[in-house]
Amino acid sequence: MAIKCFKRIDETWFGIVLDDSGRVVSCGFSVKGEEEVADSVLSNLPADISVSEGSMDGYALSILESLSLIYEGRDPRVRPELAWDRLPPFHRRALKLTAMIPRGKVATYGGVAAGVGEPRGARAVGNAEASNPFAPLVPCHRVVSSSLKLGGYGGGLDLKKAFLLREGVVFVGDRVARECVWKPDVVIEPLQSQSFRSLARDLTRFGFSFLFLM
């Protein structure tokens, strides 16, 4: 059975769910309170996961403190194993590449799509980022629109911009400066034959919605 742990650090609440192997199944944060972070973390869980209250041991505490460090714009002390296998294939590929974006840089939705071998898949990447169960360990806040405007973010655009500023990202007006754009030089697990329509069918089996590119 998975365990859940929540902790307030300074003015922000952080939460995690760990499986029997100590892998992170879901995590998150909230500036509004424990109830909101609990709703966020638990809503990202796969349907087959049962969760109980966990004791705050040193391992869980180190992960929560690392979430706080990331939120402050700093590097985490620990990088726990994530339960990647519980994600649908395209989401897993997109988020693995997102995890590679350096602090102080951003990537575009289209850039991530190209990096996973699907250059027309920007909207599919947007779906993957919006349902990211590993924030902020997987920094979906570092993915922006092709215009270099912020795009979307579950916590709101003011929070996303503040997050990026703490990490050293430079803005010119309401857009990220071009020198802060990171482009991947690898392709993550490209799908050689799966069309986006068949991909959409796969995603719906995991309970995700999908927006087609026209």
Image (cartoon, rainbow, N blue to C red):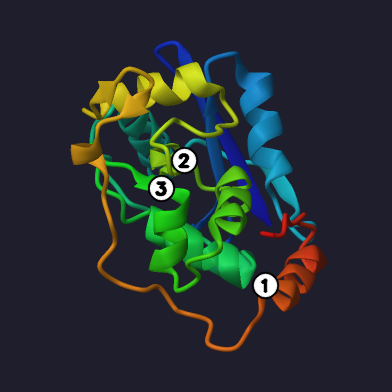
**Mark 2–mark 3 distance (CA, rounded to whole Å):** 5 Å
Q: Give the class, few, some or many, for how many residues have Cα within 10 Å of label 3's Cα (few <14, many ≥20).
A: many
Q: Is residue 133 left or right of residue 42?
A: left
Residue at horizontal 80 percent and vertical 58 percent from the top: 207
Q: Secondary structure at mark 2?
A: loop
Q: Is residue 183 left or right of residue 148?
A: left
Q: Is residue 100 above or below residue 28?
A: below
Residue 113 image offset from top left, x and y in percent: 47, 62
Q: Is residue 9 above or below residue 85?
A: above
Mark 3 lies on residue = 108
Mark 1 lies on residue = 196
Q: Is residue 152 above or below residue 102?
A: above
Residue 62 seen in the figure: yes
Amino acid type indicated by mark 2: Ser
Q: Is residue 196 left or right of residue 31?
A: right
**Mark 1–mark 2 distance (CA, rounded to whole Å):** 20 Å
